Image (cartoon, rainbow, N blue to C red):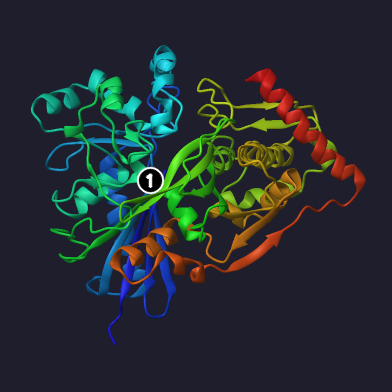
Amino acid sequence: MADQLILAIDQGTTGSTAMLYDIKEKVILGTHNIEFPQHYPKPGWVEHDLTDIWNSVRSSIKEVLKKTSKSAKHIKAIGITNQRETTCAFDNKGEPLSKAIVWQDRRTSNYCELNRKEYQNLKNLTGLPLDPYFSATKMNWLLVNNQDVQRAYHQKNLKFGTIDTFILYKLTHGESYFTEPSNASRTLLFNIEKGKWDKQLLNFFEISEENLPIVKSTFDNFGLTKGLDILPDGIPITCLFGDQQSALFGQAGINSGDLKCTYGTGAFLLLNTGKELKYSQNGLLSTIAYSYKGRLRYALEGSTYIAGAAVQFLRDNLQFIRDASEVESLASDANYTQLEYLYFFPFFTGIGSPYWNAEAKACIYGMTRDTGKAQIARACLEGITLSINDLVEAMEKDRGSPIESIKVDGGAVKNNLLMQSQSNFSGKEIIRPEVIETTAFGAILGSLVGLGLCKIGEIGEFWKQDHQFTPSFSSEEVEAYYKNKAKGWKTLCQKLF
């Protein structure tokens, strides 16, 4: 019997990954990641070249097929998952009109400050605060400041979209201009209760619906591949998925109360709230988990902008390590007695949940003469876990009950020291699955649902546990260290930011 394959395209902040899945054997055959350049034209600005992104997608597909010795003609469907709020502007031919403004970009901070009070009346429509993080402020900036975008707008040759929309447009040779609710709900233009673009929001941000994609369900028929040199014509695209919601799906988080945390460039904690649209009182976001046959499912989300990117900073900027995987060994050399007052605040692009301070800056606080690479590396890992612990505590307040365990995923969860640190600071069970690339895996499962080969209620059959971390302290002094460090973190966050 000929192979029957699903291709997932996971377009992330630092690279694009292609994953190939065998439908019959129910096994991941292989993955391949291609990194692309990051552009920082000014302090606080972060951009991607859309041509780089498209080339990285093409190359990752080509290489995963080569690596697995499989033929593209056996691909039955494609699922796409993507970095969410990053904003693209391209023309009717699919050619970029500007560099993409990345979700981490802070250039619209002043705009948000000037308009925050007026926006408060609209906040319940989106479930989101007015922050540079989200797409509408970036679209507005492009319309005001980019001449190519302005010209295309007046010539009716402008298309805005998140990355899912851009990749879909390229895959279908411009025949499909769509998005879906897990991405649309991150734009500040989408009414998350009604499930559609909202006129009040469009007017507020001065965006025309004509320049936005049509919104379909997350699992749907989004069109067919056409005119590509890497894939044959006629492969259906059956799932589009924002990366964090895709990871929740890949963790079998389909029921109300299911929870996961993804450790990628940033870290994102999502709680499935089912049919209930729940508004946070503690700095979290209300968002859409997915849409199936027009029915919306919701989630609460906590977002910290920097997680794995902090380790990249140690590697690339400080050159403490040659590879990100080396940070665990380096950090293990630090003794807790050297770390009591040392804090690494990884706020390179401001603070997201629960504080929402777009102007915050990263810093290392409390260094002494005995502070070295190992101590800073360990403080870096602790800074990641303490940022996430803030999200966990906010989530517990909103749900009104304690969290017992957290499913985790993303490349950084291979770091056992990081996972144990997370368990020790939070007091929670940390559960790592066999498949840690759950963002891409969620797109595989979503594509199967969109293709009609799997029901949503069957997703749990695909999930398997790898390891569980529980709070562990070698002595009372070490336990006290974790408690005191967490208290000190909160005090300094309030004082410094």
Q: Please identify the quarter of the rendering in which residue 432 is found.
A: bottom right
Please tell me how many numbered marks the rendered image carries: 1
In percent of the image, x 80 and y 32: which residue is there?
370
Residue 195 vertical placement versus 188 (above, below): below
Task: Please tell me whether residue 292 is drawn above or below residue 346 in the rendered image.
Answer: below
- Seen as rendered, the residue at the extreme right is 476
Q: Quadrant of the N terminus?
A: bottom left
Examine the image and state in which quarter residue 21 appears.
Answer: bottom left
- Per the image, label 1 sits on a secondary structure element best described as helix
Give residue 18's quadrant in the image: bottom left
Q: Is residue 319 visible?
A: yes
The residue most toward the bottom is 1
Image x and y of residue 51, in percent: 25, 43
151 versus 427 height, above or below: above
Can you name the residue that lies furthest to the left here? Answer: 155
Q: Position of residue 84 (x, y in %)?
A: 38, 42
Look at the image and tell me whether residue 323 can be seen. Answer: no
Residue shown at 87%/40% (left/top)? 480
Q: Nearer the viewer, residue 415 or 351?
A: 351
User: Relative to the observer, which residue lies in front, 302 or 279?
Assistant: 279
Graded by Cα atoms within 10 Å as few (under 14), some (14 to 19) or many (20 or more), the crowding at tag 1 reads many
Q: Position of residue 102 (x, y in %)?
A: 38, 34
- In the rendered image, residue 186, in percent from the top left (x then y), is placed at 38, 37
In-front residue for pair 156/147: 156
Name the residue at the top extreme: 114
Q: Which residue is mark 1?
A: 182
**Left or right: 127 in relation to 470:** left
Tell me if residue 121 comes above or below residue 407 in the rendering.
above
Residue type, label 1: Ser
